[in-house]
Image (cartoon, coloured by chain):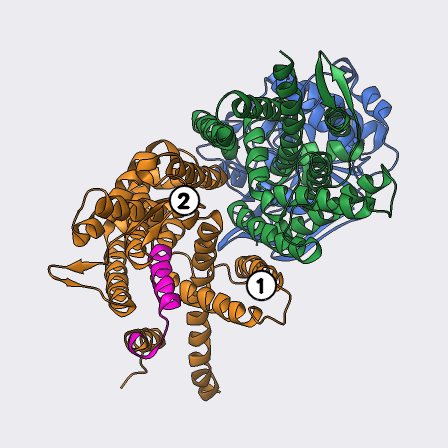
Amino acid sequence: MLHVEDLVVRYGSAVAVDGVSFEVGEGEMVALVGPNGAGKSTLINAISGLVPPHSGTVACEGRIAQVPEGRQMFADMSVEDNLLLGGWSIRNRDLGEVYDLLPDLAGMRKRKAGRLSGGQQQMVAVGRALMGRPDLLAIDELSLGLAPLVVAELAEHLRFLNRERGTAVLLVEQEVTLAFDVCPRALVLEAGRVIAAGPSAELARSETVRKAYFGDLVGAETMVAATAPETSEVSR
Amino acid sequence: MGRPNPRNVVVVASAVAGCVAPFVMGDLTFLMRMLLAAIVVTGLSLLMGYAGQASLGQGAFVAAGAVTVAVGTTRWGLPPLLALVAAPFVAGAFAALVGVPLLRLRGHYLAFGTLAMLLMVQTAMSTFDFLGGAFGISGIPAFGVGGSVFADQRPYVLLALGLLALVLFVTHRIVDSRFGRGVRALAGSETAAESAGVPVMHAKLVIFALSAMYAGLAGGLSAFFTPYVSPDSFPALDSFTYVIMAVVGGLGTLWGGVVGAVLVSTLLQVLNSVTSNPDLPPTLGPILQYATYGGLLVLALLFMPRGIVPAVESGVARVAARPRAVART
Amino acid sequence: MTELVAYLISGIALGSSFALIGSGFVVVHRVTRVVNFAQGSLAIVGGMASATLLDGRLPHGLGEIAAVLLCGVVGLAVGLLAIGRRGTHPLISLIVTLGASMLISAAVIWLWGQDPVSPPGLSGSVTILGADVQRQRLLVVAATVLAFVALALFFSRSHLGKGLTASASNPFAARMVGIDVRRMGLLAFGLAGILGGLAGVLIAPSVALSFSSDLPLALSGFAAAVFGGLTSPLRTLFGGLSLGVAGQLTAGYLNGSYQTEMALFLMVVIMIVRSSAFVQEEAK
């Protein structure tokens, strides 16, 4: 459903995304992992149309909605207004659907978004994205700054959405265990390029992935030492 | 023999024209006002271009210099040379004083703050009789050194040319100095400059005071030239005109002030003589004047944001590069 | 006592215009970070246009509304000049609006000449607390209150108004949900034109306007907006009213010619005192 081909994104003379190609099928859940500065956020922003690509194509047969890094609330506005704004571009805005999917939001609908906790804001951000009835949810750093319990709850919501509504998910995550846990397939990004791709279970055992995360403590200790001949390594 | 730098050619030609003009032209008022504006705008261009600070009230410092000369010569009997030398220093001190609170403002707040300052200076002038009161100060003696005294307009113009050259020289030295480089960093980002070790407030104050000194110098000389100073001599529109000249000429370039002053003054003078034809409606003059001011400002900012001097320089460079490119094929 | 009431009423009426012009500054600044120097000129166009439209052409009510709508269009045009081009730095936009205000002055002189103009307003007067109050001034206050209420409702309830607020609050997120932030900026300029035009239409019958009145009006409006930190319409209303009342009281009891300077001085003091707060805002 989402086809990215030879995408290159630059900031001035620096190349943030250097010839990335991949696909996300309908109803798929795909993770995008990689160390800090690998270009994951830029890639997501380019896919959402917020950053213009230098070259290459992004084609999607459905609607994409983004859950941005750092939640990006409209802080002075209420939760309900934040949600309504998520449906800016569509005709029949239906708050009821989102409140059904994420019932906690109904309870805080009048509260100012800026006053909520990180986890609550993240839920608002997901609800806001869902208002547009997207076919693909592009999520940038779901777990950033949130407690593990909260993250687990959000992950469960994502699985539910995927099961019941068939919403595809592209999850950008620094926290590798979470990413591999939620998404059956993953891509590893480093310095703007895809250095590995394949089923998450295999990537978890891959030496390449461990090397990419060398120095990154999160998730490293859960990765098994490499003897992974079956991993498909995508060379640039 | 290399091709002479086109900018230097223009400069030399203009300087020659400038020195010859006083002996050839009849009424020199226009030329004098243009030269004085060039002095003010060179300072303003420094402030806006290099230090990135907007000032809509530069006329306040022109007034400070003019009032110094007026009060100094008529009330205190100072010799004209002393009064003229004092003018920029009084203006600079005033700017340093006012700048301490004012320069804590940035961007549009500073722009409005300087405009407010100008209006308050005007009010102060008309309120206090010492500064002239409602009717201003007249009877300022002619400028002169020792025994000799300026008899007509010509020597004033030559003095103005000399002061303009002095001001340009000083600007050139400052811009090229280490201090100047620190100031240029301000225009980019004050926080970045600060972390790079530039003493931001100090640098801003110095440039602010320096631009005020240029303005005060021009004001002082103008007080001798039109021997009359009143609150109405420094309307807000003049201060806006300085901004227009700075923008059109090229902010933050050495010659931007001169080029802007020459172009805008000439354009306005032409408009003036065209519209003062008694057959035309009397409102045509002001209409075209405002339209020109507004149009110049908008067009210059939108299409030539770096001003004429850089635009011409890059244009000439492009033309010069073309024959070489053709020869290569 | 009646004198005091008279000064208060005329101060509130005058201050209402300042508040309306100030709210124009606020609307534009919140969404675009630009200060629209032409706010004063928009008021002038409003006053002058209503004079022409009411002069035997349109009845009361329609004439004023038409004039205000015209100012909305002019405001939009100013916005196109100021932010039409992508990536114009806000300070450049400020000076562009200065240029726009001069172009408007040229048009004003061309269409209406250089003499002051005053459209007919509500005639007659009413007695309040023993003081003789012109009906026109009461209309000004009522219209201003209505305008501010309408503005508040627009921003908090309407879809478009929420889009404007969102663009001001978080431009990145606004773009992300599909809001065209630049178009919102132009809308803000149009709205500012309406507010400025309304100010001019309301004040012109009492205080004749000419092309040169734009600078004092812009300064007073900006001073009112500074009270509100260039972001809060409600505090701008309060600021404008305070300025108007303070000015009239100074004019009445002290020397009349200092009211503008008082306002300017207060404005500068407030800007400087709040300067650190402003810097934090700009950094966001």
Amino acid type at mark 1: Gly
Q: What is the x, y in percent for residue B222?
A: 32, 56
Q: Which residues are magenta?
A: B22-42
- Residue B285 is tagged as 1
| Residue B166 shows up from this direction | yes
Q: Tell me the subunit letter for badge 2.
A: B
Q: Residue at x 45, y 85 (%)?
A: B323
Q: What is the x, y in percent for residue A233?
A: 59, 47
Left or right: C56 with respect to B250?
right
Pick whichever, B313 or B81, lies toward us. Answer: B81
Q: Tag 2, which secondary structure?
A: helix
Amino acid type at mark 2: Pro
Left or right: C18 with respect to C62?
left
Q: Supply the letter of whichever chain is blue.
A: A
| Residue A149 shows up from this direction | no
Q: Which quarter of the figure has residue A206? A: top right
Residue under pointer 2: B231
The relative height of residue C207 versus residue B318 in the rendered view (above or below) is above
Q: Main secondary structure of the magenta part?
A: helix
Colour in which chain B is drawn = orange
Label 1: how many Cα within 10 Å (few below 14, some 14–19, many 20+) = many
Q: Supply the letter of whichever chain is green.
A: C
Pick whichever, B95 or B160, lies toward us. Answer: B160
- Residue B182 is tagged as none
